[in-house]
Image (spheres, rainbow, N blue to C red):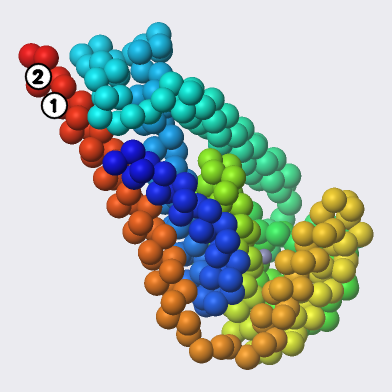
């Protein structure tokens, strides 16, 4: 029964292996939704099992330990060695701190982005920054958020390419893509094995917005050109951002220009199995530990 606690962690390893191929075989919208749900499910499952194992393992040593049940009695039924309990507490604390730091960073950078837009004129949800920098991004917020583009980048794009770029950024706002991204990023902070699931979710979000841009301009080649020109322009930025941006862009352009393949039924079934397996094993473990504690408390009274 202790093995139930290991299942979410083993499924995280499976997700680490399968995230990228599953993401490529799902339509972008389905991939973004399913992969972010899988990421948060696995993050919750691994965090919950780690917390329970840690609490049982070192419950007697904590300054605020259980008062009406003994961790030692639970350990008789759920054999958690002290070393495993200590390891679970150390790892769990470290991962929880990573989540808190990431969340604070997210809120701080969002506030900075909103503050940077104060005083700038907005026309139909579009804010143009009058300088030669190369940037385009979407800032979510009240009233549907704002799309921000620099004059320098607009100058590099043809009319249809501008339309594609703006349709792409507006799709991010309309479909609230920032929520999927933040959920995936925080999940990977809570469980580093979920990093490929985070990357696949972020790629799916970009592909989803690319698809909306194709619908707006009616030509995948124009969207691919807009992505390519924007990526080349932004490549003049920090060298550290170069590699990731290029590989992402190459994958997006390739998927955009390749004909849509037949729907692979195993892909949604695979992601669904990961999610169902994670929730079932986590709840089974938590429920069993809870039942033991209840039984011990009942015997003590
Ligand atoms: Zn985008």
Instruction: From this view, report whether residue 125 is shown above or below residue 140.
Output: below
- In which quadrant of the rendered image does the C terminus lie? top left
Which of the 4 image quadrants contains residue 104?
Answer: top right
- Residue, x 59% and y 45% (percent of image)? 192
User: In the image, is residue 292 above or below residue 11?
Assistant: above
Residue at the limit of the structure toward the top, as seen here: 63
Say above or below: 268 vs 15: below
Total residue callouts: 2
Query: Where does residue 34 sit, x and y in percent of width and height?
Result: 45, 65
Residue at 57% from the left image edge and 57% from the top image edge = 16
Which residue is at the front of the view, 217 or 286? 286
Residues at marks 2 and 1 touching, judged by CB atoms closer than 8 Å: yes
**Quadrant location, the N terminus:** top left
Q: Is residue 10 visible?
A: yes
Q: Which residue is mark 1?
A: 295
Indicate the position of residue 148 as horizontal and vertical percent values: 72, 59
64 is higher (above) or lower (below) than 53: above
Label number found at residue 114: none
Identify the element where label 1 is drawn: helix
Asked if disc 1 is less than 8 Å from ligand 1, the answer is: no
Q: Which image quadrant for residue 257?
A: bottom right
Q: Residue at x 52, y 47 (%)?
A: 187
Q: Quadrant of residue 122?
A: bottom right
Q: Which residue is mark 2?
A: 299
């Amino acid at each position: 029964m202790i093995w139930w606690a290991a299942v979410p962690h083993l499924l995280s390893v499976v997700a680490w292996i399968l995230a990228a191929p599953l993401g490529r075989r799902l339509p972008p919208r389905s991939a973004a939704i399913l992969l972010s749900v899988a990421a948060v499910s696995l993050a919750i499952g691994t965090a919950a099992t780690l917390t329970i194992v840690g609490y049982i393992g070192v419950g007697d040593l904590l300054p605020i330990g259980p008062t009406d049940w003994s961790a030692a009695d639970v350990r008789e039924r759920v054999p958690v060695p002290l070393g495993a309990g200590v390891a679970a507490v150390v790892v769990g604390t470290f991962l929880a701190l990573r989540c808190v730091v990431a969340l604070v960073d997210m809120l701080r950078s969002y506030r900075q982005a909103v503050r940077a837009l104060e005083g700038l004129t907005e026309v139909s949800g579009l804010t143009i920054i009058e300088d030669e920098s190369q940037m385009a991004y979407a800032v979510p917020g009240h009233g549907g958020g704002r799309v921000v583009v620099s004059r320098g980048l607009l100058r590099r794009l043809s009319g249809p390419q501008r339309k594609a770029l703006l349709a792409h950024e507006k799709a991010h706002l309309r479909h609230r893509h920032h929520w999927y991204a933040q959920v995936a990023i925080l999940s990977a902070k809570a469980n580093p094995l979920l990093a490929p699931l985070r990357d696949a979710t972020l790629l799916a979000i970009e592909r989803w917005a690319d698809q909306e841009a194709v619908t707006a301009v009616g030509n995948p080649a124009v969207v691919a050109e807009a992505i390519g020109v924007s990526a080349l322009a932004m490549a003049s930025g920090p060298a550290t951002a170069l590699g990731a941006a290029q590989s992402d862009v190459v994958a997006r352009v390739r998927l955009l220009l390749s004909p849509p393949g037949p729907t692979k039924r195993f892909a949604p079934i695979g992601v669904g199995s990961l999610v169902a397996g994670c929730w079932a094993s986590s709840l089974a473990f938590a429920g069993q530990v809870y039942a033991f504690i209840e039984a011990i408390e009942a015997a003590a009274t």
